[in-house]
Image: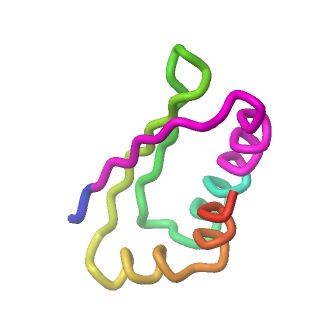
Amino acid sequence: MIRKVAQYKVKKVEVRAVEQAIIEFVAAITQNEPHTFYEAYQGGDGVSFIHFMAFPDQDAEKKHMSAIYTMKFAEV
């Protein structure tokens, strides 16, 4: 099992766009990666986010990292 955490902050004006992107991203992961664990949370300051993920193996992580929905989320 490969576990990762991602933390970041966004500009206040970008919060709504990021929230929507997270919803779409998590939905795509759920649909396309049934064995991947993924949760995303927004911090109390409203601009901080933290994502927890676990991949069953390196192949699953590779698939996730190269997926179109991952690249789309990273662009946001």
Using the rendered view, name the quadrant where residue 27 is placed: bottom right
Query: In this orientation, which residue lies closer to the viewer: 46 or 24?
Result: 46
Name the residue rendered at 48%, 74% in the picture: 64
Name the residue rendered at 59%, 63% in the picture: 74
Query: What x and y, as percent, mark residue 35?
Result: 42, 66
17 is within the stretch colored magenta: yes
Query: In this orientation, which residue lies closer to the viewer: 9 or 19?
Result: 9
- Above or below for 57 versus 13: below
Using the rendered view, name the quadrant where residue 46 is placed: top right
Q: Relative to residue 52, is residue 56 drawn left or right?
A: left
Name the residue rendered at 44%, 38% in the picture: 50
Query: In this orientation, which residue lies closer to the viewer: 25 or 45?
Result: 45
- Above or below for 57 versus 16: below
15 is within the stretch colored magenta: yes
- Name the quarter where the C terminus is drawn: bottom right
Dominant SS in magenta: helix
Q: Which residue lies furthest to the top in this view?
A: 44
